[in-house]
Image (spheres, rainbow, N blue to C red):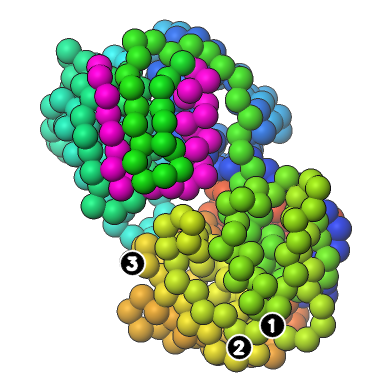
Amino acid sequence: MDKLVITGNGPLEGEIVISGAKNSALKLMVACLLTDEPLVLSRMPNLADTRFLSELLASLGVEVYWPKGESTCHLNAASLKTTIAPYEQVRKMRASFNVLGPLLAREGHATVSLPGGCAIGARPVDLHLQAFEAMGADIVIEEGYVKAAAIRGLKGADIEFPFPSVGATEHTMLAATLAKGTTRIKNAACEPEIQDLADCLNAMGANVSGAGISTITIEGVEKLHGHKHTVMADRIEAGTYAMAVAATGGNVLLKDAPVEGLTAMIEHLEKAGVSAKIEDGGLRIQRGEGRLQPVDVDTKPHPGFPTDLQAQFMALMSTADGVSTIRENIFENRFMHVPELARLGAKIQIRGNEATVTGVEKLKAAQVMATDLRASVSLVIAGLVADGETTVSRVYHLDRGFERLEEKLSACGATIHRASE
């Protein structure tokens, strides 16, 4: 098992190229199951999660050509050999569950294990299953598996979610592309990754409109065809590096950063005293001397402040000149990084879904442990500004969502390397 060793080493300077978005790539990959023609995805992030999913797709019979280290992935589901996704595969990552809808839409039946993933809340899949039932599927849950059947095919339906669930919106949209008739998703999530998925599906011959607003309409078609698609840049990765620069000071250009999806984060950084300027080719983050100003945050669905940047922003506020309040409104168990930040000297009090952060002048190095994907990178940010040598263990969490992180930070002057525990 690996760990990261970090020594606080002053400002970051240079350029960081933002990789393809993990949260988009995973849903784009399962779209290959909707057609018997090749789907080619470029700017694919080489991550543990995307590699796990490629293995699952291969086990279903998808031909996968994705050499190690390359950013173009070729997927061909011309002939599937099974519609069963076993626990051993799906447990590794929650997004694996999204093979259910495409398999159900194309083959008329599927058996998929209930998912695993980060322990940041219950995140039940009931909304996914209710949507498929509304579209005519018969669903039974037995021994940890979802068994779904729609032998006569899925049918269009009006589906209204009680809250804008990203996963349920994407999953329903995937399945509805091959349903008979019209499907309307009301109170749909509006994240940019949903627009990216819709763009790809439409290029494959689907008829999806309204992605990016609260009502999405899908006119079902009989068949989808192949396509070559470039995965959108990762706004969470871009936001993470922006906060690393803000924490350490310095001047870094985030090349290819999807600025239109980062409006809320940019507003919060500017309130803290950090310059975030749009440039041709990306977003330039620059912080002068002096301490950051405290800023309150409420996580909200897009276009609000992303829950996936909450832990990173908390690390940033740990050295601000004053008190900030961070409210987590999306997941009920996403403050697990707080005890680890406290080991580095952060002063944070939690009451329910609210964290009060009293900034300190300096953090101090310590041995800390990652608890989930975003928590792990918040500890990296804190380690970059702490006095001494910080070690972050269990970084397999980090490898699920950040491509070549230590390489990208080192190129900007950070002292960080990977070692075996």
Can you tell which of label 1 and label 3 is closer to the viewer? 1
Q: x%, y% of residue 188? A: 34, 45
For residue 292, the mark is 1
**Residue depicted at 83% across the width and 66% down the height:** 251
Label 2: which residue?
A: 359
Residue 117 location (% of width, % of height): 40, 49
Q: Is residue 400 left or right of residue 243?
A: left
Mark 3: amino acid:
Glu
Is 407 displayed left or right of 339 in the figure? right
The reply to whether the C-beta atoms of the residues labelled 1 and 2 are less than 8 Å apart is yes
Tell me which residue sits at (42%, 8%) in the image.
Answer: 79
Q: Earlier in the sequence, mark 2 or mark 3?
A: 3
Q: Secondary structure at mark 3?
A: loop
Q: Nearer the viewer, residue 81 or 1?
A: 81
Relative to 414, does residue 168 appear above or below in the rendering? above
The residue where tag 3 is placed is 332
Residue found at x 47% / y 77%: 326
Circle 3: is it few (<14), some (14-19), or many (20+) Cα within 10 Å? Answer: few
Classify 123 as above or below 129. below
Amino acid type, residue under disc 2 in the picture: Gly
Query: Mark 1: which secondary structure?
Result: loop
Crowd class of label 1 (few under 14; some 14 to 19; many from 20; radius 10 Å): many
First to last magenta residue range: 180-204
Question: Was residue 200 drawn as part of the magenta stretch in this picture?
Answer: yes
Q: Amino acid at mark 1?
A: Leu
**Distance from Cα at disc 1 to Cα at disc 2:** 9 Å
